Amino acid sequence: MEAGISVVIPAKNEVESVGQVVARILDSLAGSEIPSEVIVVDDGSDDDTGRVAAEAGASVLTNESSRGYGASLKLGIRAANHEVIAIADADGTYPVERIPELYGMLDGYAMVVGARTGDSVAIPAARKPAKWIVRKLASFIAGVSIPDVNSGLRVFRSKVALRYFRMLPSGFSFTTTITVACLCDSLPVRFVPINYRPRSGRSKLNAMHFFNFLALVARLSVLFRPLRVFIPAATALLALGVFKAVLDVTEAVDLYGWNFVVEGYEVISTSSAVLLILGGFLFMTGMLADALAVHRPGTDL
């Protein structure tokens, strides 16, 4: 692939803002002398999103029907001519003028993420608790603090994306997946504070996306760091099983004295046995999953 940067923008019904976003990106790249292109993927829009993007100077790819945010990004990445990929949203929320700056920071890193932790961040208050939960879970799985797990403004090498293409989802969790995957594989990721503007138009996120993000983080933990989930769960079950077994023995001593050992009474309850068996099962499953994760094929960067 050629040196330079390809900016991929998924867009669905963003006629009000996509032209301005493309123009801002082209203006910032024109002043940087970086070989570049802007690719807008029109994801089944029923307005003039594609036409406006083309008139602003972008190359436009079109999905005849909506395939999703992640699927649109993957289509644009496959079509890119440059070895570095930048992604941005078409709704005007991200400071796309900083793409050349993020590109310049990529040396020595697999990915540079614009983290929405700047001085002016317009994230709706109703979304902050859900974002905090997802971010904390992702940080726990990755073993490092993640300031912004699903920022839509980032720059990465195309081979990083291709490394994980088979597991990158078609929906909004594309960015969460590639962030956690890189960090779990110990690839160097840099987070740079950026501002975040109020969006124009209506957001496409809804409450179900929160539960999808939680399910995604659980799936990624099994793929990359299974012991971080299985060992705590197994330990909790084993501890409960031992505690319940001690209570069973204590109750038997109160009723029969220590003669129950000689008489061979069954004093361990079914619940105690089930907890201990499940704890042992989860422990062994975690060890097996960890062995598979360790030997998962990788790609040298």
Image (tube, rainbow, N blue to C red):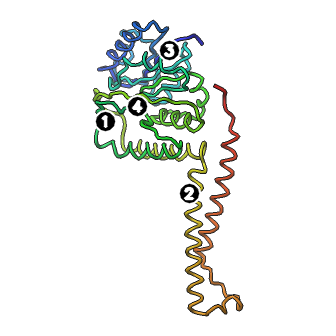
Q: Of callouts 2 and 1, which one flags the residue occurring earlier in the amino acid sequence?
A: 1
Going 38% across and 29% down the picture, which residue do you hit?
193
Of circles 2 and 1, which is in front? 2
- As measured in the structure, the alpha-carbon distance from the residue carrying label 3 to the one carrying label 2 is 43 Å
Depth order, front residue of 214/45: 214
Which amino acid type corresponds to the residue marked 3 in the rendered image?
A: Ile
Number of numbered discs visible in the structure rendering: 4
SS state under label 3: strand
Query: Gap between marks 1 and 4, in whole Å?
Result: 12 Å
Q: Is mark 4 on a helix, strand or loop?
A: strand
- Compared to residue 50, the image places residue 210 above or below, namely below
- Tell which circle, 4 or 3, labels the residue nearer the N-terminal end: 3
Residue 104 to residue 117: above or below: above
4 left or right of 98?
Answer: right
Which quadrant is home to the N terminus? Answer: top right
Task: Look at mark 2 in the image and give the residue it sits on.
Answer: 232
Circle 1 packing at 10 Å, graded few (<14), some (14-19), many (20+), is: some
Tell which tag, 4 or 3, sits nearer the viewer: 4
Where residue 249 appears, as percent x and y from the top left, is 60, 83
Query: What residue did someone put label 4 on?
Result: 115
Q: Determine the CA span between mark 4 and mark 2.
A: 30 Å
Disc 2 and disc 1 in contact, CB within 8 angstroms: no
Q: Where is residue 207 in the image (x, y as percent from the top left)?
A: 37, 44
Check disc 1 and report the residue beneath it: 123
Q: Nearer the viewer, residue 268 or 56?
A: 268
* Residue, disc 3: 5
Instruction: Please name which of the two marks, 1 or 4, marks the residue nearer to the observer.
Output: 4
Q: Which mark is residue 275?
A: none
Measure the C-alpha gap from mark 1 to mark 3: 28 Å
